[in-house]
Image (tube, rainbow, N blue to C red):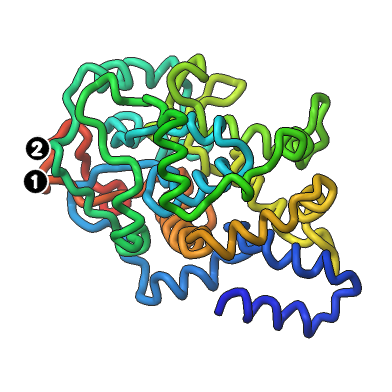
C-alpha cells in the first residue's frame, strides 16, 4: 500500500528518469523526516500519548524496538560486521543523565555524567521477565519486539555488542540473505574514503554512533542509545543536529523532480536491486513506520523531548522502586 501510494505520486509528477524515480521512492521511505507526518498518523492516529505515568523510566529512542531493528537491517545490509557492533542489551538512562539531556538536548559534558554511568555499571538490571511499558507510539508488532534487545540483567551486559553470530541469526529471522548484502566494494563506495564528501561523511558518522559498543568505542554508550561527539558531549543518536538526524535529510529530494543524495549514492555504488529487495522481502518498511511514529512523539521534530528520550511507565510507579525511575519532567 505504501509503495503504491508513493509510486503513484511520483508517476503523477512524471519524473524524467525512470531509474531515479523508482530509487528515490525507495530511499525516501527510509527518511524519518520525509515520512514523519504520514507515518505518525498511520501508526498512532490518536493524540500523542504523552508521559504514561507520574514516574517514568527513560530510554533513548534508538533502543526502542522498531527503531533498533530498522537500524539493524540497514546496517546489516551495508556490512554484517558493522551491525554486529550494535548493542545486545538496552539500559534505561540514569536519572541525572535523563534530566541533563532533557534540559540540554544537544548534549551534556561526559565528564559531568561519567559518575552516574559508572554508578549504574555496578547495579543489577531488570529481571529475566521484565517488560518495558512503551508508550503507544513506540510499540510495534510483538513478533518483532521479541527480537529487539532486552534490558540488561548483569552490569557487564551494558554496551556488550551483539556479535556476528547473533547478528547473522537475527538477519535470517528478518528475511535477509547473503545476496542482499552489499559487497565490500559497494560498502566502501557508500561510505567513501577520507576526505569524504558531506553526504558520505554523515553516513559514516551515523554508522559509528549506532555501533559505539564495547571493543569498538573508547567511550561506549550504545545500550543507552547515546553517543559522544568530538567535543566530549553525550547526546542521543537522534538529538538535534546529530549525524543520524542529518542522515534523514539525505533522503529528501535535492530539488523538484530530483533524486535524493542517498539515491545518487545508491546509483553510483550500483546497489539499487539489493535495496529494492531489502524493502520487499524484510519488514523494514513496517519497522521504519513504527520508528518514525516513536521519534515523531519523542524526538526533536516537535516531540515531547527534543533530546530524543522516551518516557516509559516506571515499574512500581514510584521514584524509589528503581534507580532509573524519575518524575516525568513535562508534567512537573
Nearest to the observer: residue 63 or residue 171: 171
Of the numbered discs 1 and 2, the one sitting upstream in the chain is 1
Q: Residues within 10 Å of mark 2 (few under 14, many from 20)?
A: few
Is residue 154 toward the left or the right of residue 26 in the image?
Answer: left
Please name the residue that numbered disc 2 is placed on.
321
- Measuring 22% from the left and 40% from the top, which residue is drawn there? 326
Q: Residues within 10 Å of mark 1 (few under 14, many from 20)?
A: few
SS under mark 2: loop
SS under mark 1: helix
Residue sticking out furthest to the right: 16
Total numbered labels placed on residues in the image: 2
- Measuring 33% from the left and 36% from the top, which residue is drawn there? 90
Which quarter of the figure has residue 208? top right
Nearest to the observer: residue 195 or residue 180: 180
Is residue 88 toward the left or the right of residue 3 in the image?
Answer: left
Q: CA distance from mark 1 to mark 2?
A: 6 Å
- Measuring 66% from the left and 61% from the top, which residue is drawn there? 276
Please name the residue that numbered disc 1 is placed on.
316
Is any atom of residue 63 visible in this view?
Answer: yes
Q: Are marks 1 and 2 in contact (CB under 8 Å)?
A: yes
Quadrant location, the N terminus? bottom right
Amino acid at each position: 500500500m505504501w509503495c503504491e501510494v508513493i509510486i503513484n505520486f511520483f508517476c503523477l509528477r512524471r519524473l524524467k528518469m525512470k531509474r531515479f524515480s523508482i530509487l528515490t521512492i525507495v530511499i525516501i521511505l527510509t527518511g524519518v523526516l520525509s515520512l514523519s507526518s504520514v507515518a505518525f498518523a498511520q501508526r498512532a492516529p490518536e493524540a500523542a500519548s504523552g508521559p504514561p505515568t507520574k514516574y517514568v523510566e527513560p530510554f533513548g529512542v534508538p533502543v526502542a524496538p522498531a527503531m533498533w531493528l530498522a537500524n539493524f537491517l540497514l546496517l546489516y545490509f551495508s556490512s554484517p560486521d558493522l551491525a554486529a557492533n550494535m548493542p545486545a542489551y538496552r539500559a534505561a538512562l540514569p536519572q541525572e543523565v535523563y534530566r541533563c539531556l532533557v534540559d540540554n538536548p544537544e548534549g551534556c559534558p561526559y565528564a559531568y555524567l561519567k559518575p552516574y554511568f559508572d554508578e549504574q555499571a555496578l547495579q543489577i538490571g531488570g529481571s529475566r521477565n521484565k517488560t518495558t511499558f512503551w508508550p503507544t507510539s513506540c510499540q510495534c508488532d510483538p513478533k518483532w519486539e521479541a527480537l529487539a534487545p532486552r534490558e540488561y540483567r548483569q552490569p557487564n551486559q551494558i554496551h556488550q555488542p551483539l556479535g556476528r553470530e547473533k547478528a547473522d541469526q537475527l538477519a535470517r529471522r528478518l528475511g535477509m540473505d547473503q545476496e542482499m548484502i552489499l559487497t565490500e566494494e559497494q560498502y566502501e563506495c557508500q561510505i567513501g574514503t577520507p576526505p569524504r564528501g558531506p553526504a558520505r561523511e554523515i553516513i559514516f558518522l551515523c554508522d559509528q554512533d549506532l555501533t559505539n559498543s564495547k571493543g569498538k568505542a573508547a567511550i561506549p554508550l550504545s545500550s543507552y542509545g547515546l553517543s559522544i561527539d568530538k567535543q566530549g558531549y553525550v547526546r542521543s543518536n537522534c538529538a538535534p543536529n546529530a549525524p543520524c538526524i542529518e542522515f534523514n535529510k539525505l533522503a529528501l529530494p535535492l530539488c523538484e523532480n530530483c533524486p535524493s543524495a542517498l539515491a545518487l549514492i545508491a546509483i553510483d555504488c550500483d546497489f539499487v536491486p539489493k535495496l529494492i529487495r531489502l524493502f520487499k522481502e524484510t519488514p523494514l518498511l513496517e519497522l521504519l513506520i513504527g520508528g518514525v511514529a516513536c521519534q515523531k512523539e519523542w524526538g526533536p521534530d516537535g516531540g515531547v523531548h527534543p533530546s530524543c528520550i522516551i518516557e516509559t511507565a516506571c515499574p512500581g510507579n514510584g521514584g524509589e522502586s528503581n534507580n532509573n525511575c524519575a518524575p516525568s519532567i513535562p508534567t512537573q
